[in-house]
Image: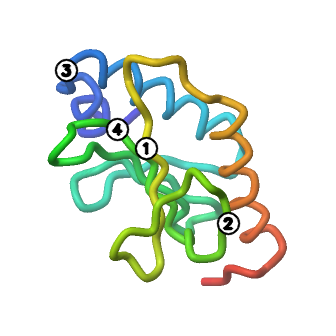
Amino acid sequence: MLQELQNYYLNQKEPNKSCLLALRSIILEQDNEITETRKYGMPCFCYKKKMFCYLWTDKKTEEPYILMVEGKHLNHPKLEKGERSRMKIFRVNPIKDLPIKTIESILQNALDLYRSGTITA
């Protein structure tokens, strides 16, 4: 892991640090083609060099979330659009067990958009 990325995770306060590291592992485990970098100061995950999702924390609640880059193509009741036209977020409560099946389902649905060619560069 790049030093800059490692510092991002290590500088988070608990319980967010553990939560974000767990989310990172879940995301990276979804496909061998997923890589991690840093964009806009936050961890960014790419699928075959195309931006796929980000990890970040809400400024008001300080709770972590996964930002799905092509969220407009995803229909899931737990994804929030807010004021965004393209992206949607999946909020995570860092003091509760992670809804791993839900997270994996959302990530796989998003990956399928890239694999099928629905999302192109």
Q: Nearer the viewer, mark 4 or mark 1?
A: 1
Is the Cβ of the residue at disc 4 closer than 8 Å to that at disc 1?
yes
Q: Secondary structure at mark 1?
A: strand
User: Is disc 2 surrounded by few (<14), some (14 to 19) or many (20+) residues within 10 Å?
Assistant: few
* Observer-nearest of 121 and 90: 90
> From mark 2 to mark 3, how far is it between C-alphas?
32 Å
Residue located at (42% from left, 53% from top):
54
**How far across and how far down the image is residue 76, in percent?**
66, 58
User: Which residue is rendered at x = 67% and y = 83% of the image?
Assistant: 120
Residue 11 placement, left or right of 115: left
Q: Quadrant of the N terminus?
A: top left
Residue at mark 1: 91
Q: What residue is at 60 percent from the left and 83 percent from the top?
A: 121
**Mark with earlier residue (2, 1):** 2
Residue 31 higher or lower than 73, as above or below: above
Task: Indicate whether 93 appears above or below 112.
Answer: above
Q: Which residue is mark 4?
A: 64
Give, as a three-letter code, the residue at label 2: Asn
Query: Badge 3: few (under 14), some or many (20 or more) residues near its Cα, within 10 Å?
Result: few
Q: Position of residue 84 (x, y in %)?
A: 38, 76
Q: Nearer the viewer, mark 2 or mark 3?
A: 2
The residue wearing badge 3 is 13
* Front position in the image: 15 or 116: 15
Answer with mark 4 or mark 2, whichever residue precedes in sequence: 4
Pointer 1: residues within 10 angstroms few (<14), some, or many (20+)?
some
Question: Of tags 3 and 1, which is closer to the observer?
Answer: 1
- Residue topped by disc 2: 75
Amino acid identity at mark 1? Arg
Query: At label 4, which amino acid type do we have?
Result: Pro
SS for tag 4? strand
Q: CA distance from mark 3 to mark 1?
A: 17 Å
